[in-house]
Amino acid sequence: MAPTKKVGILGATGTVGQRFILLLSEHPIFTIHALGASSRSAGKAYKDAVRWKQSRPIPDNVAQLVVKSCEAELFKDCDVVFSGLDADVAGDIEMAMLKQDIAVFSNAKNYRRDPTVPLIVPTVNADHFDLIPHQRQLNNLKKGFLITNANCSTTGLVVPLKALQDAFGPMSHIIVNTQQAISGAGYPGVPSLDILDNVVPHIGGEEEKIEWEVGKIIGDISEDKKSFVLLPNTIVSATCTRVPVLDGHLESVSVKFANGSPSVEQVYQVLEQYSSEAEKLGCHSAPQKPIVVTYDADRPQPRLDRENLKGQAVTVGRVRPCPVLDIKFVLLIHNTVLGAAGSSVLNAEIAVAKGLI
Amino acid sequence: MAPTKKVGILGATGTVGQRFILLLSEHPIFTIHALGASSRSAGKAYKDAVRWKQSRPIPDNVAQLVVKSCEAELFKDCDVVFSGLDADVAGDIEMAMLKQDIAVFSNAKNYRRDPTVPLIVPTVNADHFDLIPHQRQLNNLKKGFLITNANCSTTGLVVPLKALQDAFGPMSHIIVNTQQAISGAGYPGVPSLDILDNVVPHIGGEEEKIEWEVGKIIGDISEDKKSFVLLPNTIVSATCTRVPVLDGHLESVSVKFANGSPSVEQVYQVLEQYSSEAEKLGCHSAPQKPIVVTYDADRPQPRLDRENLKGQAVTVGRVRPCPVLDIKFVLLIHNTVLGAAGSSVLNAEIAVAKGLI
Amino acid sequence: MAPTKKVGILGATGTVGQRFILLLSEHPIFTIHALGASSRSAGKAYKDAVRWKQSRPIPDNVAQLVVKSCEAELFKDCDVVFSGLDADVAGDIEMAMLKQDIAVFSNAKNYRRDPTVPLIVPTVNADHFDLIPHQRQLNNLKKGFLITNANCSTTGLVVPLKALQDAFGPMSHIIVNTQQAISGAGYPGVPSLDILDNVVPHIGGEEEKIEWEVGKIIGDISEDKKSFVLLPNTIVSATCTRVPVLDGHLESVSVKFANGSPSVEQVYQVLEQYSSEAEKLGCHSAPQKPIVVTYDADRPQPRLDRENLKGQAVTVGRVRPCPVLDIKFVLLIHNTVLGAAGSSVLNAEIAVAKGLI
Amino acid sequence: MAPTKKVGILGATGTVGQRFILLLSEHPIFTIHALGASSRSAGKAYKDAVRWKQSRPIPDNVAQLVVKSCEAELFKDCDVVFSGLDADVAGDIEMAMLKQDIAVFSNAKNYRRDPTVPLIVPTVNADHFDLIPHQRQLNNLKKGFLITNANCSTTGLVVPLKALQDAFGPMSHIIVNTQQAISGAGYPGVPSLDILDNVVPHIGGEEEKIEWEVGKIIGDISEDKKSFVLLPNTIVSATCTRVPVLDGHLESVSVKFANGSPSVEQVYQVLEQYSSEAEKLGCHSAPQKPIVVTYDADRPQPRLDRENLKGQAVTVGRVRPCPVLDIKFVLLIHNTVLGAAGSSVLNAEIAVAKGLI
């Protein structure tokens, strides 16, 4: 077996950071080597620095690790750095890590629109890793690189969209309505007075992210592997709401195909049969299949389906004709697993499998 | 002041029936005269027959009323009958009441598609009462008639749609996503194990109701006042979900106009200025205006906006361009007030004002 | 009718402050004259300074009032100041207001244990106002004075305890378990990730407050009206938990009487018949009776009973023998009405009725 | 390794039955052999008969099993029968199974007070199995016997009480307040309209169960192993409430010791060191230790602690002096694992280890 890789986790005390720790504490190829957080936490044992909010306890091998501040110098012996940092600090810190020649996997929005940074959903566009040699050349790096995840809602959306696009050609119009879990806002995040017995029909910046990111993720990489070709003719309209659910974003989607509508049966078949490079590469965290299809009339549901295939699959159901566009369906994504830390970890496993780390 | 009208309430122990009692117990022109429920409740004092679930107590003048079974004979001295009956029994009972020459206001779905029964949302299509003379003639009645409310979600939707259609002409396409409160399912209704920390993306029959009812309500009545002209070219696509909210349905709507899109500012202006016959007739339960417009980025919200104008207004906000259709917005309706009993009561007040009762 | 009194509200943008505004915006003897908040809010119109979280909208006559900073000088033309300030700033500001010779009604804990400050629950110990002349003398004041409310949970508890003590003599032991609403923690207060699908069995300082405050409130005032005689032999043990409820604290109480146990029937009778000086003085906000007794096996419940008598009554039910102590029962208090702002307003009405303002 | 035992599950489609299936589908010594449910379900494949409400999917080896009606004849080739039947049918069916000479583990209340039926909490009183030979003799059985679990709330309570009694001698008085999860009421169980934004301070029969069962479970078995000696001088007073929590009952407990109070430190030490026969026998489902002690001021919490040691441990925290009795603390039990199916399974493992099966 290959030697394990040393990993650092930035923003280790936050909601995404806690999930990273659960996913990595018993990982076959990654070993948690360093934890980074704000200067307020630096110098403390992790268990004293964190307000742990997971239902599983802090892993023993992490509880006593001393948290560092997020200076690149302190992480230079890491092979990989996973970042769960907030956008307001992620930009500078992640760039500094990259310049240390570290492989950086970011959950923040800062570099998603950067034309030299792949925006990768692991079960959708692992081929976008092909741009890494070009990125390294630009930055004069030997082994470091920078990859970002997509926004959690976007991630759930692009998995079935990619399956449909592969099978039926380009989609001209997509309307999506999300009902997003409170864990997506971090901790303390959403005040309980705002969400108990309530729905909040607004999440700052979320609609814009979805409407833009889809076009990069299920778009192409250029032949020379030096740029991304965003989808030119696929228009997305999003409405995002927050609901009193702990984990799991539900999304209602209507799509119109440029070349005519498939039947409901064809859509179900394509979703069932969709597979991705991640499984084929035998990655540890890859779900058996990227999409779990449900035929029950009242599924998917956040509480019952978010753990499907350990939270790394998207569950899709209620496929039916849309009287206005062509086809409509409902999907569910575990927002802090595949929608955040789980994507990063799987992306890193893919990078290892591809020899990039 | 005119003499008050005697009213009966059918399904008086149910969720809608309880709301009728709160709305009618201190009404200036209606007096609660008779309560009807299943044979299991008949013969009991109302307070002993009901499982009261409202936050205000049972009105004193109702608590001791003896509940009757829903036989038309027993309600023949009522001027008006409000029905909160379930669809499985509403059909026969409401028809029997009509044949007793009583004015019947139904909340059930049974007669909504009947071409001789007006489907009226009071702040939208009070002109559909014009068909009553024809209905009476067909049924050989002197003072009785039968009116139905719309489905609760449809009711919220058609108020702004009517405003927009009046101002900007026909809409060709409408996509609506609802997030509906548990009170819409009655009592015991939704099991708590199904909805706590969860969303259920399915409400049986609801999507079909919305997709059909819109076309009748904001359609026309024929010149001879003997039939309804359903909208021929307005297509509606609905997705309905249940959320852990007590009262208040939230709906995300996208619309496309047949004759080109108005601006966001024009839409706001039209929504602000919309008025209906109900206010002009001076009806007691008419809201000051049918639509409350909110400009806050995160409104409307069920818990904060459902009581706006005593629950008889629809609150609309987040008007913005839709990249796929033309305009999108979010609305909120109090599902058991304007969405059910409140519509019936206001419809009855309109009928009195028009001299039909 | 007497001329109205000008009132100021400190902490006007907070949860308690918002409730003050709802209670006072249409009050027969008090007129909202000034609003105070932090320097961040000062200078702004109230509607722009506040994050309004009530289900009723901001009253029109308040929305445009310009918020002041909480300097005593700026409130000197107020007859009364109601304070919803947090404990960390309440001490100095309230003292400064007192020194301006203003009648101050505080919701904070700072002066509750001060031997010269009455701790008054309006339907329990209005006779403690008798110490005001002594307090004025000590502070060299003509019309100002300082009164505090009790903690919200204590307030609910002492109302039935006072009734029982008046009828059956002293209680030797009291055990109370509370299940408290999230609104008690203010805004943003409890993070939703902490309370959805959860109970938190700890509220900092709350148990100590309850265990101490009971003895002052249902204790005596000395014959010379210059000091309070705390209950010497009544021991209280409290456990406090936070539950996912918006408003309304539920408390399970067991009591042991020093002179032998009354019967359940006697307890019910005493609770039913309890009355307080507040009603007798004809105060506007006094509930018809201080205690609403319920005989339903599953009541009181927060959602169904918190609005009883406009939130100014305590609802008590499930009176039954306690195998360990003597009698146990369950009570409910609306924590932001009688448990906070409502107590202050009613206390001020009592003070007016007694000629102290 | 010993040959596996064939097990039947009665009430297999219910909430407790579903949990049995999850616990037994990959069990080292038990194999699911037969499923029993009502006649309505009999004859259907399990996946078609059940409304599955668990977050993990139906195990593959169970989904296609055909459900039987609960006739003893149909279960006679089972070595063990686990019953999750409701009390209204459990009495006759479980007795019929016993007469078939089957080892029956019941979750229902029917036989808990039977003087010849052990009431066993596996980490508390496994020595009560010693009565089985006497029970067999009375019923003329060779290998069958009947054991019951305790009520879920009682189960949580007796684990720390047993630890305290073993160390500090008898307790004279115990007051307990429970906050119980909705899953305790089965499905459909608690209507969402009753529990959202609410607490219900009553669970029918629950308080009586707790007050009685404690005395049998932590009481003795007679020297001749033919009867149980209930605690003669330990009085329990319970108040039970339902809260909007999915799984996990929280209990606030105060106890008085007959022989004087231990210190808080002594109590913590005793709870930490408590161990039970179940671990010592090496049972598969035994938790590493029966009690998880938490020292955080705001723990245990249902959402964060219910899965501790796979739901088979009781979590105890907030140990502190009780001003009225001696010591108070807060505990949490997973009501559908250790509080129901998990107790039965562990009891059966103990019985196997003791050679009774």
Image (spheres, coloured by chain):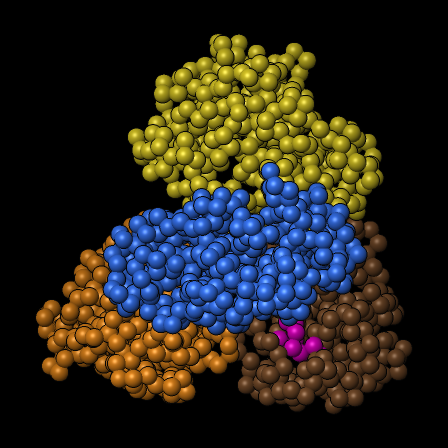
Chain colours: A blue, B orange, C brown, D yellow
Q: Is residue A236 left or right of residue D345?
A: left
Instruction: Indicate yes or no whether the magenta region holds residue D268.
Output: no
Left or right: where does residue A285 sit relative to residue C141? Answer: left
- Tell me residue B327's x, y (percent): 37, 78
Instruction: Give the left or right position of residue B237, taking residue D87 as reference.
Output: left
> Magenta span has C16?
yes
Q: Please say whether residue D318 is visible from this viewpoint.
A: no
Q: Is residue D51 left or right of residue A345?
A: left
Residue at 52% from the left image edge and 41% from the top image edge: D184
Question: Is B86 located above or below residue D183 in the figure?
Answer: below
Disc tally is: 0
Q: Residue at x 27, y 53 (%)?
A: A266
- Residue A242 x, y percent position in the rendering: 50, 64
Instruction: Between residue A42 and residue A130, name the one nearer to us.
Output: A130
Q: Which residues are magenta?
A: C5-18
Q: Quadrant of the N terminus of chain A?
A: top right
Instruction: Evaluate whether residue D102 shows in this view.
Output: yes
Q: Quadrant of residue B22?
A: bottom left
Seen at 73% across and 71% down, the residue is C86
A354 over C66 or under it: above or below: above
Residue A288 drawn at (x, y percent):
45, 44
Q: Residue at x 33, y 65 (%)?
A: A170
Residue sitting nearer the eye, B6 or A339? A339
Place of residue A205 in the rendered image (x, y in percent of width and height, measured from the top left): 52, 72
Tell which of D117 and C64 is nearer to you.
C64
Frontmost residue, B309 versus B36: B309
